[in-house]
Amino acid sequence: MMEDLELNAHKNNIPIMERDGIEFLIDYIKKNSVKSILEIGSAIGYSAINMALISSEIKVVTIERDNARYLDALKNIKLFNLEKQIVIINDDAFNVEIKDKFDLIFIDAAKSQSTKFFEKFKINLEKKGTIITDNIYFHGLTYDMEIKSKNLRQMTRKIREYVEFLKDNKEFKTDIIEIGDGIAVSRRICE
Ligand code: SAH
Ligand code: MG
């Protein structure tokens, strides 16, 4: 069933997390006893489903702006019987105001906006929480200085700026993990 989701995503060019990236995320959630997760960018629900399947105690709130993907995600969440654990919101994350706090925030939406997502949603992070961001290497293009396409150049520049923003951030300590498409793990520094 999980293979069907993966095949379906690849066939339709939906950028779901790479398998080793997902394994890393699952491992992180287990080791750190993460129970509540806010995800920005659900696509068809693949990563949210993988995280929720770890334990019935885990709750995921996930946001997807694209209506067709939202509907697919909803269908897939039902298929896996995870309606009690996953709440999906169909809106642009920048329009969504959430009061809850989460152990983990997973940013996996528009890559040029990661800094803005980080700044908007860090108020939703528990004191000792972690923000994880996917696609730091962007298929190995983030540090490629010979990109021809202007849009792609702009996007990779934004990702580099995001990495700098994380490195300079006094409130969080970030490790960039060379797994999958590059994963940033930003832990809030607490005394
Ligand atoms: N986390 C998913 C993949 C997400 S792909 C997985 O690994 O299974 C990124 C998704 O983010 C896309 O479906 C895109 O529509 C969505 N997205 C991009 N910008 C967004 C925004 N501002 N608000 C909500 N969703 C957004
Ligand atoms: Mg991703």
Image: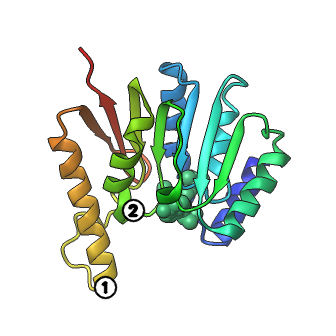
Pinpoint residue 94: horizontal percent, then vertical percent: 46, 58
> Is the residue marked by circle 2 packed among few (<14), some (14-19), or many (20+) residues within 10 Å?
some
Q: Nearer the viewer, residue 146 or 150?
A: 150
> Which residue, given by chain and number where applicable, does mark 2 sit on?
111
- The structure residue drawn at horizontal position 54% and vertical position 33%, both measured from the top left corner, is 100
Question: Where 67 falls versus 151 (above or below)?
Answer: above
* Residue 182, image x, y percentages: 37, 50
CB-based contact (under 8 Å), mark 1 and mark 2: no
Q: Residue at x 74, y 48 (%)?
A: 2
Choose mark 1 or mark 2, whichever is in front. 2
Hey, which quadrant is residue 151 in on the image? bottom left
Looking at the rendered structure, the kind of residue marked 1 is Ser
Q: Is residue 168 left or right of residue 191?
A: left
Q: Is 124 left, or right, of 185 in this rendering? A: right
Label 2: element kind: helix
Q: Which residue is mark 1?
A: 149
Earlier-in-chain disc, 1 versus 2? 2
> Taking 122 as reference, is 40 left or right?
right
Using the image as rendered, state which of residue 61 and residue 34 is in the foreground: 61
Residue at the limit of the structure toward the top, as seen here: 191
Secondary structure of the residue carrying numbered label 1: loop
Look at 31% across and 70% down and name the residue there.
155
**Quarter occupied by the C terminus:** top left
- Residue 40 horizontal/vertical position (percent): 51, 51
Q: How far apart, in angstroms, are the residues tagged by discs 1 and 2?
A: 16 Å
Q: Mark on residue 75?
A: none
Look at label 2 and name its amino acid. Lys
Q: Quadrant of residue 30?
A: top right
Image height check: is 147 above or below 76? below
Residue 173 pos. (x, y %): 24, 32
